[in-house]
Amino acid sequence: ETNQLFDGIISNPPYYINSLEGTNARANRAKHAAYFSFNDFLSKCYRLTNEDGVLMYIIPSDDVDFHVHSAKDYGWCLVQRIDIYSKVDNLVRCVLVFRKKVLVFSKKDLVIRNVDNSYTKEYISLTVEYHHKQL
C-alpha cells in the first residue's frame, strides 16, 4: 500500500452480485463481486484520496441503491449520477461520482443508440477519440 494521496480514483470494479458464473475462471474473477469486497474497496479509496477526493465507478443500474448506501457508510457523498441507456428505454449501467464533501447533486442521462440502432450524437462526441473508424 502507498502513503500517496490521490485527487481521485476511477474504477470499473467487479459488479455481478448473485449471478451465474461462466466457465472462464479469469473472467469470473474480473466480473463477479463474490471475489471482491466493496466494503474494502470503498474504505481503501477513502484512505487513498485527499480531502477533496473523488471516487467514480460504473455499476449495473439495478445496484444503485446498494452502492449509494454502502458508500455513505464509508464517508462518501453522491454528487453525480449518470444513467447510461443502451437505447432510450433501456437503462443498463450507472456511473456514480462520490466526493468526501457534500456538494450539489446532479443527474445526467446518456443514451448510446437511437431507435434505428445508430449511435447518438452525444455518444459519438464523447467517444470519438476511441474509435478507429467513423461511427
Image (spheres, rainbow, N blue to C red):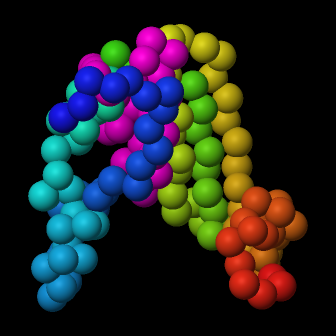
Coordinates of residue 134 in the picture (x, y in percent): 83, 85
Residue 48 sits inside the magenta stretch: yes
Q: Which quadrant would residue 132 be assigned to in this image?
A: bottom right
For residue 90, side relative to residue 43 (left or right): right
Residue 118 sits inside the magenta stretch: no
Coordinates of residue 111 in the picture (x, y in percent): 72, 62
For residue 16, side relative to residue 84 (left or right): left
Q: Quadrant of the N terminus?
A: top left
* Res 62 seen here: no
- Which residue is painted at 77% across and 87% down in the image? 133
Coordinates of residue 75 in the picture (x, y in percent): 34, 16
The image shows residue 66, relative to residue 52, as above or below, that is below
What is the span of residues highlighted in magenta in the rendered image? 47-74
For residue 88, side relative to residue 101 (left or right): right
Q: Quadrant of the C terminus?
A: bottom right
- Which residue is painted at 37% across and 48% down in the image? 63
Q: How many marks?
A: 0
Q: Nearer the viewer, residue 10 or 22?
A: 10
For residue 84, side relative to residue 69 (left or right): right
Coordinates of residue 40 in the picture (x, y in percent): 18, 35
